[in-house]
Amino acid sequence: MRATLRWAHSDLRTHRGEALFLVLATAGIVVSLLLATALFGYATNPWQRVFAESRGAHVWIHTSESAKVGRLTGLDGVDSVAGPYSTAAATLASRGTRAAVELRATPDRPTVGRPLITSGRWLNARTPDGVVVESSLARALLAEPGDTLTLPGTGRTVTVLGVADAAEPRYHAGERAGLVWALPSAVPHPTGRVIGLRLTDPADTDYVVQRAVTVLGAGAVGEVSTWQQARAEAQGDYRLLGQVLGLFGLGALIAAGLAVHGAIATRIRGHLRDISVLKAIGFTPGQVVRVFLSQHLAYALLGAVAAAALTETLGSRFPGGLGDAVGVWQGLPGYTAALFAVPVGAVLFIGATTGLAAWRAGRVPPVPGVRPVGARGERVPGGVRAVPGTRAVSLPGGQLSALSRRALGTRLSPALVLGWHTVVSRRLRSVTTVARLALPLLLIVVAMSAWTTIDRFHSSPERIGLPAALTVHANDGLSERGTRALLDRDPQVAAAYPGLEVAALVPGQTATIALRGLGTRQDPYPYALAEGRPARGDDEAVAGQGLLDLLDVRIGDWVRLTVGDQPQILHIVGRSIEPENAGRVVSTSLDTLRQNDPRLTPTLYQVRLRPGADPRAVAARLTAAGHGRLDVHAVANPADGLSPLRGVVAGLIAVLALIGLIELLTAIGGTVREGERDLLALKAIGLSPRQITAITVTATGCTALAAALVGTALGTPLAHWLINAQGRSSGIGSGIAQAPSPALLVLLGAAAVLGATGLAALPAARAARRRLADTLSAVA
């Protein structure tokens, strides 16, 4: 045991930097995996908790006021109902912020779909104008219990009694109205009704919706929302962040395992004589294997424990939503098990790769083999010929190839030629080194692509389906002409596209999707198309990926949608990039919708601003110009929720760079040790220490260059595939991936090559200046 500890201590002193990098890389990998687990838990469990505690309804159906919703209580598969409740559309304003809301007349606190009060209290008759506001709407309005909210244009005010969570779709400015519970007296003029259905089997959701629409009649149904939609919306960007972290964490773990495997294999090749001595003095093969295995398991364990401790103590203090996610995750039932299982899994994986490499050390014979020498009488650079009858010496990589000999006959430096020959001649070893080094570089390219794609969402929103910066709704009887005049009067408004968005029933009447009519044939809306062509003719439309998947249709198909009791038959001619409503959107021109249903009139304007205009300033100016008759909202950019991903990507790049550094140090150490054996031959043919150093530096640089080319060539298409696959699964659709600029990729490759050559220069120079007596002992 003492000899084993002394050997491990000596090896640690020799490879301090490599040990430190292994500990840091393992810590970074385990932290990323723990954060991925936290984000997955945060994305799923909060909504699931609210749904369970509130006995949430699986289906919410909005109907007309005259619909006979009482018939739904006897449907097969319906366990219980919430409501029906009368509803009215309204606008609430607070602290200069306005929001479209649905006032829901709720005489008693529900038993199904019961709002969970997070602050304040529930409704009571002593405060007839009191309301309870859904939490996401409360955050948008900056409203708290006790605040007074106004209803612009009515002269009415309401008092916030409480804020509550609900397992229903959340408020999104300009896209979905917020939810407000009020007493029936506070909803004097209801315009519709809503009923919630809690099912005996959630898997029957589509069937129950279809039956409900059949019973009520398609003309009576305005909108249908299901628990699957609410859950997917609640998970939102956190699930995406978890997927990104998990993907890169697993990739980095594999890269770290390969790096450890390569480091041990290289160290074994450089210490064959030492291992033979250990066996000669009584070490068994199992003891030799345990030396390497225990040493690297200790590094991995130290990094994993540090990562778990960091996540436990500082995880909830991470900036932004990442810290909130970790804080919630720490209170979930499976937190302790995950905090233990993830580090243990990482250590076991590294231990498996370590054991595979250490097994080779156990097979080293007690008597080291004789190193093969060069052919007798072989001509070497400089015209020197090995003397017959004497011990021959070998050149780096063995016998020179014909190409290398021709290169030496030119004006090329012998050091460059021999460095390239060293890499090419050791094909298997060089290929494995390039592969191990290319993997972290490949993942860095993927991470850079994710960063570039997010920047594209911010810098060029029109290319990802967001050409308009503002959404404007007219209130209080403001005419279409008056609204258009107000918009055209602003100098920073480039274009205003009239339109409307209605809920439409899909074929089979199992769900509702968004049917959007924007622009006219004379002034078409600039949709961002990924496939197909724009909708120019009658009955032509473009659709998001989410709708194509929902209806199982393709470009060129016809779809029949139902708005109230009016059918809309549209020809899908293109696929648009749709970041809203999970891509479940069909878009056409306003003229086409009016042609099919003349009763439809514009209800909104999508406003495109001039370059450099501030959306907030323009929104404030339009609101003031409209004297409270315009609701102006900035169009939400999905990249806003991905802002934590920038810091995550930066951290992952740092971890991957550490892993690449470990692999570089391994490659450099192996090349230097191999070069020490050839030092006599190189000095014998007249090469100076500087030229001998250049051989090692060139070999390392060529390896790094090959790895950079492979990593870039494979990482760019892989990044496109991964990002577009995520876009398809989220409903936005493919076509959103953006590769880093060629200059950035060249900079990455240059940094890898320059870093490799810089790291190799010092150890190579030291080896080249060794005394001849030391060199003779190394090759003896």
Image: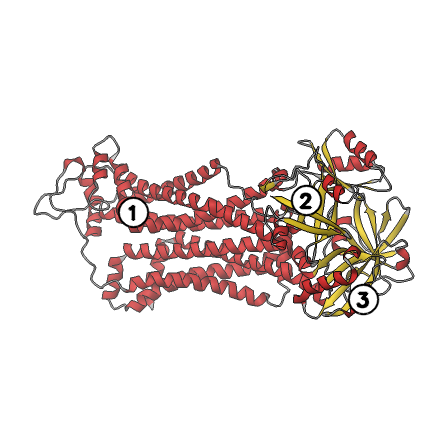
Residue at the spot x=29%, y=47% of the render? Answer: 672
Residue under numbered circle 1: 672
- Which badge, 2 or 1, comes first in the chain's sequence? 2
- The location of residue 450, given as percent across then percent down, is 54, 46
Rendering coords of residue 752 (x, y %): 41, 42
Mark 2 vs mark 1, CA separation in Å: 64 Å
Taking depth in this image into account, of 736 and 296 the one nearest to the observer is: 736
- Vertical order, 332 against 685 (above or below): below
Q: What residue is rendered at 23% in x and 48% in y?
A: 677
**Disc 2 versus disc 1: nearer the observer:** 2
Residue at the spot x=73%, y=52% of the render? 562
Describe the element under mark 1 as helix, strand or loop: helix
Q: Is residue 499 left or right of residue 546?
A: right
* Amino acid, disc 3: Arg
Tell me the quarter of the picture where residue 539 sits: top right
| Tag 1: amino acid | Val
The crowding category of the residue bearing disc 1, from other C-alpha atoms within 10 Å (few below 14, some 14 to 19, many at least 20), is: many
Image: 692 above or below 208: above
**Badge 2 is on which residue?**
587
Percent from the top left, x then y, of residue 536?
A: 66, 37
Tell me the residue at 14%/38% (across/down): 384
In the rendered structure, find residue 652 and report the number of the disc placed on it.
Answer: none
Identified by mark 2, the residue type is: Ser
**Marks 3 and 2, the one that precedes in the sequence:** 3
Q: Quadrant of residue 639?
A: top right
- Residue marked by disc 3: 71
CA neighbours of label 2 inside 10 A, class few (<14), some (14 to 19), many (20+): many
Is residue 609 shown left or right of residue 688? Answer: right
Total of numbered circles in the picture? 3
Residue 329 visible in the picture: yes
Residue 608 location in percent, x, y? 70, 35
